[in-house]
């Protein structure tokens, strides 16, 4: 996601600085092509996020951007809302450097933290009213997702929201079946060479762990949220946006 650094780039950010910078630039260009062509429905997901903030967060709120990346789409989603403070977390130093410039457009204070987002939420003691994560939570196994969502529930408290845009299946489906549906997208990704498509697809097959729609709802209730809603499903039926609150 634009507001979540390219998972490809974040995954490599533990390499030595020079190599990491080169890898970031190469993979960021591929990721930007994904975003610019809207292959993962970024525009629709961030439009839903923006509408949700406008309609349900009328008072000043603190926004936590988990795996924020360059924060470009988040800045657009936060425009004209009552955001009072922004905090972004990401592991990629180059992505955070981009975010630092992008976030100057916000009418509120902001801070950025370079850290693995799982550890950051586990250690966090500062509350937030809205926590957002897009296309990053699916890197975790089910039990790990639940643990992170429990941490997020503590952070947002009784009146806050956790909003996620993630890999999802409309019904019972194995991981292998979801991957086969992912692979069938190839004809629509016309902007990508075979090499670029292979790079992205290899990453997805190695790292993504989608959950069924009912599992996402169960995870929300298990984490302590009182309400779990699906607010958007992509036309490919590969991704869904959920809001968890009380």
Image: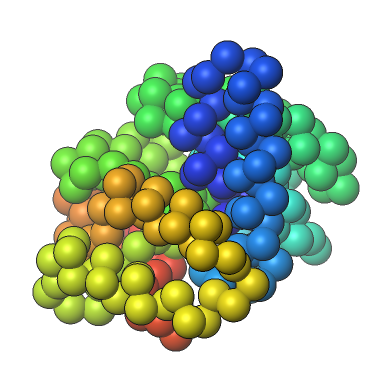
Q: Residue at x 25, y 78 (%)?
A: 170
- Tell which of 79 and 5 is nearer to you: 5
Give the answer, above or below, for where 41 lies relative to 149: below
On the image, the x and y values in percent for residue 63 come to: 61, 45
Q: Seen in the image, is 74 located left or right of residue 189?
A: right
Give the answer, above or below, for where 211 lies relative to 207: below
On the image, the x and y values in percent for residue 189 come to: 54, 75
Q: Seen in the image, is 223 located left or right of residue 86?
A: left
Is residue 168 visible to the viewer in this orientation of the structure?
Answer: yes
Q: Seen in the image, is 86 located left or right of residue 188?
A: right
On the image, the x and y values in percent for residue 197 come to: 49, 62
Q: Seen in the image, is 92 located left or right of residue 79?
A: left
Is residue 44 visible to the viewer in this orientation of the structure?
Answer: no
- Tell which of 47 and 179 is nearer to you: 179
Looking at the picture, the colour scheme in use is: rainbow
On the image, the x and y values in percent for residue 6 come to: 56, 46
Asked where in the image residue 87 lies, by quadrant, the reply is: top right
| Residue lying at the far top of the rendered structure | 16
Asked where in the image residue 48 lies, by quadrant, the reply is: bottom right
Q: Residue at x 76, y 30 (%)?
A: 97
- Tell which of 209 and 26 is nearer to you: 26
Q: Quadrant of the N terminus?
A: bottom right
Q: What number of labels is visible?
A: 0
Q: Quadrant of the C terminus?
A: bottom left
Q: Residue at x 63, y 54 (%)?
A: 30
């Amino acid at each position: 996601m634009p507001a979540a650094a390219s998972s490809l780039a974040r995954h490599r950010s533990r390499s030595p600085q020079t190599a990491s910078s080169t890898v970031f630039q190469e993979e960021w260009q591929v990721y930007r092509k994904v975003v610019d062509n809207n292959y993962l429905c970024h525009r629709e997901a961030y439009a839903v996020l923006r509408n949700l903030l406008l309609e349900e967060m009328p008072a000043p709120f603190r926004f936590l951007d988990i795996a924020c990346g360059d924060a470009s789409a988040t800045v657009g989603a936060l425009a004209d809302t009552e955001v009072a403070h922004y905090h972004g977390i990401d592991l990629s130093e180059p992505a955070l450097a981009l975010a630092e410039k992008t976030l100057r457009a916000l009418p509120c204070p902001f801070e950025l933290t370079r850290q693995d987002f799982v550890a950051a939420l586990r250690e966090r003691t500062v509350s937030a009213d809205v926590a957002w994560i897009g296309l990053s939570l699916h890197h975790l196994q089910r039990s790990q997702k639940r643990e992170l969502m429990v941490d997020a529930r503590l952070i947002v408290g009784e009146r806050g929201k956790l909003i996620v845009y993630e890999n999802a299946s409309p019904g019972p489906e194995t991981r292998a079946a979801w991957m086969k549906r992912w692979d069938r997208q190839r004809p629509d990704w016309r902007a990508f060479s075979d090499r670029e498509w292979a790079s992205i697809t290899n990453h997805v097959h190695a790292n993504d762990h989608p959950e069924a729609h009912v599992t996402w709802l169960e995870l929300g209730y298990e984490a302590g949220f009182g309400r779990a809603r699906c607010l958007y499903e992509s036309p490919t039926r590969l991704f869904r946006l959920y809001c968890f609150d009380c």
